[in-house]
Image (cartoon, coloured by chain):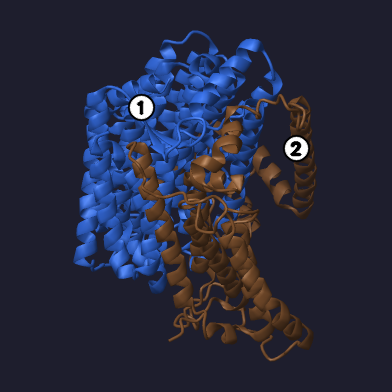
Chain colours: A brown, B blue
Amino acid sequence: MASYRLFRRFANWVEGEEVYPIPEIEKNGSSVREHPITEDMARVRSSDEGVGTLLRRWMDSPQGVAAFRRVYTVTAALLCAAIVTLLLVTVSYLPRFGAPDNPANNEVPRRYIEQGLSETGAINVVAGMILDYRAFDTLGESNVLFAATVAVLILLRDDGEGKKKKRAIPELKQEPERERPDPILRASAAVVGPFALLYGVYVILNGHLSAGGGFSGGAILGAALMLLSAAFGQEKLERVFTARRCKALTFLALMCYALLKSWSFYTGANHLPSGIPLGTPGSILSGGLILPLNICVGLVVGCTMYSFYACFRSGGMRDGT
Amino acid sequence: MTAVQNYPFALIMLFLASGVICFVLSGRIAKWYCLVLCGVGTVMMAMTLRYVLAAGESYVYLMGHFPSPWGNELRIGPFEALMAALFCAIALFSIMGGMEHILEDCEERKVNLYFASFCLLMSSMLALIFTNDLFTAYVFIEINTITACALVMLNYRNGGALIATTRYLIMSLLGSGLFLIAVILLYDLTGHLLMEPLGAAVETLRMTGGYLFPLTVIVGLLSVGLGIKSAIFPFHTWLPDAHANATSASSALLSGLVLKAYVILLIKLIYRVMSMESHAVSFAADMLFVFGVLAMIIGSVLAMGEQDLKRMLAYSSVAQVGYIYAGIGLGTTAGMIAAGTQIVTHAITKPMLFCAAGGFMGVSGGSRRISDLRGAAWRDPLSGVAFFVGALSMIGIPLFGGFATKLQLTLASIALPGWKAWLSIAAIVLSTVLNAIYYLKTTAALYSKDGTSPYDELRVTYRTLYRALYVIAILAFIILNIWQGIGSGTFTGIIREGLSLLG
């Protein structure tokens, strides 16, 4: 009898009948599964009695859900603890940190350190590594930032035109605290802001000579812009720094990076001389491509940080005129 | 060095730069630009493939002026070139097939951002295919993660897409994190990031027996990290929602290509860093095999219970990825060839099914529920044919692509002594039966005109241009499928040669 019922259900399923009808709300509304329980409850209603049904009914009852939550929490904690233990045990097997005969101290870093200056022209060995020896990784890295910008713009950019009907986050109000000037913030930003901008530029331009470079300098630039924007309002900043200009800067910086590096990859792979002078180590115009690349990276990082801030604050920068 | 040898590098840079270019173009121009770019890419990669096949060997391309252990490198062989050519072609057809839906689902002023993400995604997948460097792989995995999530998220007016993206992002980042930890540990033990010196150093470690425990953990982390990102069975939970809620072109790209890019990277790692001999006897191979076999069955069972067409296709992807991992887990060259064949088969079939699903939704008021789609194949006959061909291929009927996989996998299993052979053959049989049940049932529902669907009288007027693109894409997919089914020797032969050159 049971097998016949099973067969009937299978035959109905093949016929296309819905074994577990989904409630009307989901049929009519959007396809959001707002509450998985509603669907499961519907399953209970329609299916016939059996051990599986009883189990499912218990799982859908409040006690069942609570029990599932407890089991879930405990299992998650146990799994995390197990993975943490495994990784810690692994670390205990690793070579001692900082020992001179570690496998990581091989010919690779030796060449970076010993010949880095003569081969890349950069006094800052790290700049030589990330922008010359392994420039492809860094190119990818700056495109990660760009990809993140694109993703954030997709979600948060408010085009104005779609404001009424199709905002992703309807309850977001525009510039909620514009009318509340904060004297302390303004006064300190007026003093710190220009110096922070200048310092960011300094760190970028000296990336090949001292600690720093495009990523850190760009972060300083972006932070300075955020500070100014928070203190004086986004409209003030948009007199000079509009969405259009930010877009243009990002575009130019990434295209420059791609073109310059393509040239250097192309000549390298084809064993041609690149024709880029390395200059005198120590002077500001030295290090071959490292200085222009640092500038590109710095611009990308700064623009990315600031446009994130603008997006989260008020749905993006205005296009300006 | 001949000009052809520069093409892989040039194409990666071209896609990277195009991401930035699409960012400033208007959506109207960007969409044509991307189509042309994919077409050019396909031709370039086909020429590269012809070159490496004629040369009979792979070559290394320096990214800069510094050789192996110091600088970045690409490595191009028949396997990589075939996959790259295929990826460009599939991307072209997926975008063509889903163009109308992209323009419907996106806000008008964000269409260019869709194509910017698409270009970056393509660039990252090509870089993952060609790279010879673990850290480069990690960087491009990051790009891949972000842009893949962006492609799902762009459909955010369908509320489910945001939830799906969040879940996808979390799981995907977990996978990247495990991969990064593995790369760090590996660097700490060997001091190398490029695959050749890394493979040599790992081989030395294995000979001397040093660091055995960390090495095991590394292999596990690499497999699980890449496994999560390609939705191997117990970590597949993010996949159905993400693939179902995206616009149909994104679903096609994500299921056809993004899942495979990680598998290809894993295959390269197995051949070039861990070595096939040690992979064959490793615990990781057994683990991947068991997960793959479970995925083949459980993915199909879950697909049977679905009443949402795109979620059903997504669960079917879980099962199909299971075939790939079962092949890898067999631990033999034949198994790897079967896995490669399955990568090709699934990449040419699933995007077609998703495009067809998009076509059905277009004539059914945008609903994805199979009960609403009853009779949809009569309202949109071309999508009906495409779905039927895709279904036959996924089941594994001879003359269609899926048969090539099942044949290769069965042959690989028979050659193997022990428990894996029996388990694998049993799983293939069971999975085939399950596939047949739910695919044929769905096809029957799509073709049944019993007047129960509220959309029976719906007449849709297509925009001629996009419809033409759709027709071309679907025809191309069908031809590829039948080619893979009848002349499966073409792709399988290239994969065999490519894998032998990888080792």
Question: Do the residues under discs 2 and 1 have CB atoms within 8 angstroms?
Answer: no
Residue lying furthest bottom in this view? A179
Q: Are marks 2 and 1 on the same chain?
A: no
Task: Using the image, name the chain to which the residue with label 2 belongs.
Answer: A
Q: Name the image quarter holding the N terminus of chain B.
A: top left
Observer-side mark, 2 or 1, equals 2
User: Label 2 sits on what residue type?
Assistant: Leu
Q: Residue at x 42, y 12 (%)?
A: B414
Compared to A168, does A74 lie above or below? above
Q: Residue A288, image x and y in percent? A: 46, 51
- B201 or A256, which is in the foreground? A256
Q: Name the image quarter holding the C terminus of chain B.
A: top left
Q: Residue B474, image x and y in percent? A: 25, 49
Looking at the rendered structure, the secondary structure element under dot 2 is helix
Decide if residue B81 is in sight here: yes
Q: Residue at x 45, y 16 (%)?
A: B332
Q: Quadrant of residue B285?
A: top right
Q: Residue B398, image x and y in percent? A: 27, 27
Query: What label does residue B270 carry, if any?
Result: none
Looking at the rendered structure, the secondary structure element under dot 1 is helix
Residue lying furthest front in this view? A280
Q: Which residue is mark 2?
A: A79
Q: Which residue is mark 1?
A: B405
Task: Using the image, name the chain to which the residue with label 1 belongs.
Answer: B
* Left or right: B245, with A108 as reference point: left
Q: Residue B99, image x and y in percent? A: 31, 60
Compared to A6, does A99 lie above or below? above
How many other residues sit within 10 Å of disc 1, few (<14), some (14-19) or many (≥20)?
Answer: many
User: Label 1 sits on what residue type?
Assistant: Thr
